[in-house]
Amino acid sequence: MIRLSWLISLAITFFGFLIVNQLFETEVSGTTGNLGFICIIFLFPFILLSLFTTFRYFLTVVRIGKNRGKWLVIYGGLLLTAFFLYLFMDMKNSIGASLFEISEETGQLYFDVYTFGLIHSISGVLGALYGSFNPKTQEIDERPSK
């Protein structure tokens, strides 16, 4: 059940990222603002939920998995994070925008597929690391023995 909730929240957030990215490119006549900024307000709770669900999913996967599989998930997640970070920085350099100012160009940068992958891979790696270094403790059966 946790996998299904993770996939649903991932899909909602992914399509939200794509919509916000397209709305940053759209210019509406007669308005002074940008539609992308308005949609960020509606997307923000779904982003937080999706990041929490990703963290919880990988935490659960690592806790119930075998020792060899735990480290495979962690190393794979770190490689995926490095890959998305490289793509994000390459896109930032090609746009030539600063990371600390928000404009139409940086709006497209922050709500891109690479950014989506980067933040979710970081969340997954953090969940996997937390699950491997803080394994779930065994619950003690407190029923009286006969």
Image: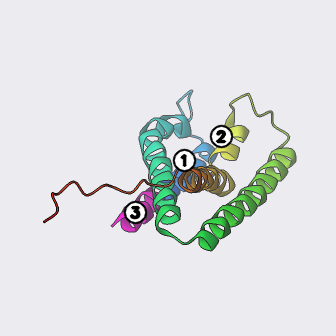
Q: Which residue is mark 2?
A: 107
Place of residue 78 in the rendered image (x, y in percent of width and height, measured from the top left): 72, 58
Q: Main secondary structure of the magenta part?
A: helix
Amino acid at pointer 1: Val
Judge from the rendering whether residue 72 lies leftward or rightward of residue 98; answer left or right. Answer: left
Q: Answer yes or no: do the residues labelled 1 and 2 have beta carbons within 8 Å?
A: yes
Judge from the rendering whether residue 53 lies leftward or rightward of residue 23; answer left or right. Answer: left
Judge from the rendering whether residue 102 lies leftward or rightward of residue 13; answer left or right. Answer: right
Q: CA distance from mark 3 to mark 1?
A: 18 Å
Amino acid at pointer 2: Gly
Query: Which secondary structure, mark 1?
Result: helix
Q: Is residue 26 above or below residue 58?
A: above
Q: Which residues are magenta?
A: 1-12
Q: Is residue 6 magenta?
A: yes
Q: Earlier in the sequence, mark 3 or mark 1?
A: 3
Q: Which residue is mark 3?
A: 8
Q: Which residue is mark 1?
A: 20
Q: Residue at x 46, y 35 (%)?
A: 41
The 10 Å Cα crowd at callout 1, few under 14, some 14 to 19, many 20 or more, is many
Q: Earlier in the sequence, mark 2 or mark 3?
A: 3
Q: Is residue 69 above or below residue 95?
A: below
